[in-house]
Amino acid sequence: MKGELKRLVTVLLQEIDDWPATGLLIAATNHADLLDPAVWRRFEMRVEFPMPTDAAVRRAVDIFLGATKAPAAWTDVLAVTLRDLSFSDIEREVMLARRAAITRDIPIEDALGQVVQNRVEPLPRRERGQIAMWLTEAGISQRQVHELTGVSRDTIRKKTKAVGEAPEGEE
């Protein structure tokens, strides 16, 4: 396998080197750290695109939901849950929910809830707790946060109360 990968890198480098000087070569990757440094040396310019901000994720969710009749709170739930994903990954998740709602003839809220649960379920307890707090801060009820994340309502209450209490001398 390792020899095959080296041959692939060699072929890629040769193709880049053989590219006509009058041509424009544009390449993209989601895994820049996996590419051989020799590839990067052959490009004059490197443009990095940061991951979407929370506001951009919220706008993307709105756009990808389109005319779907989902309550406004779902935009906040998805924006929190899909944080740290690329726009294409956000689109894929939302479109999966829309398709599921249509093909399984279920309410869009149920399909969106499944997307959230699928994203949250494999996470370690600490990360699920953080998402639960973000959802609570976004105005989602503690009952619904519990259903989506599996974090107990008691834990959510305790964490919410702890965050709301400022240490003495602070306001």
Image: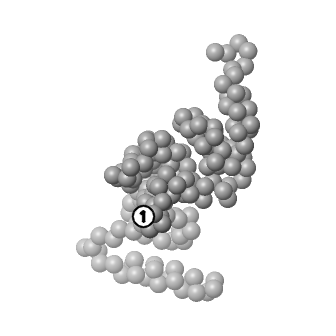
Q: Position of residue 22 (x, y in %)?
A: 25, 73
User: For this rendering, which residue is in front, 142 or 136?
Assistant: 142
Q: Residue at x 60, y 59 (%)?
A: 118
Number of labelled discs? Answer: 1
Q: Residue at x 52, y 83 (%)?
A: 8
Does residue 19 appear to the left or right of 89 in the view shown? left
Residue reaching furthest top? 169
Is residue 40 something one can see in this rendering?
A: no
Q: Residue at x 54, y 34 (%)?
A: 139
- Location of mark 1 (residue): 102
Check the image and report above or below for 145 versus 121: above
Q: Position of residue 106 (x, y in %)?
A: 48, 60
Check the image and report above or below for 87 versus 19: above
Q: Residue at x 56, y 57 (%)?
A: 114
Q: Position of residue 165 (x, y in %)?
A: 69, 22
User: For this rendering, which residue is in front, 113 or 29?
Assistant: 113
Give the quadrant of the N terminus.
Answer: bottom right
Q: Position of residue 100 (x, y in %)?
A: 47, 64
User: For this rendering, which residue is in front, 25 or 126?
Assistant: 126
* Amino acid type for the residue under numbered disc 1: Ile
User: For this rendering, which residue is in front, 26 or 115?
Assistant: 115
Residue reaching furthest left? 22
Is residue 32 something one can see in this rendering?
A: yes
Dividing the picture into quadrants, the one containing residue 20 is bottom left
Residue reaching furthest front? 105
Q: Residues within 10 Å of mark 1 (few under 14, many from 20)?
A: few
Check the image and report above or below for 163 versus 50: above
Check the image and report above or below for 168 versus 162: above
Dividing the picture into quadrants, the one containing residue 115 is bottom right
Give the quadrant of the C terminus.
Answer: top right
Q: Secondary structure at mark 1?
A: helix
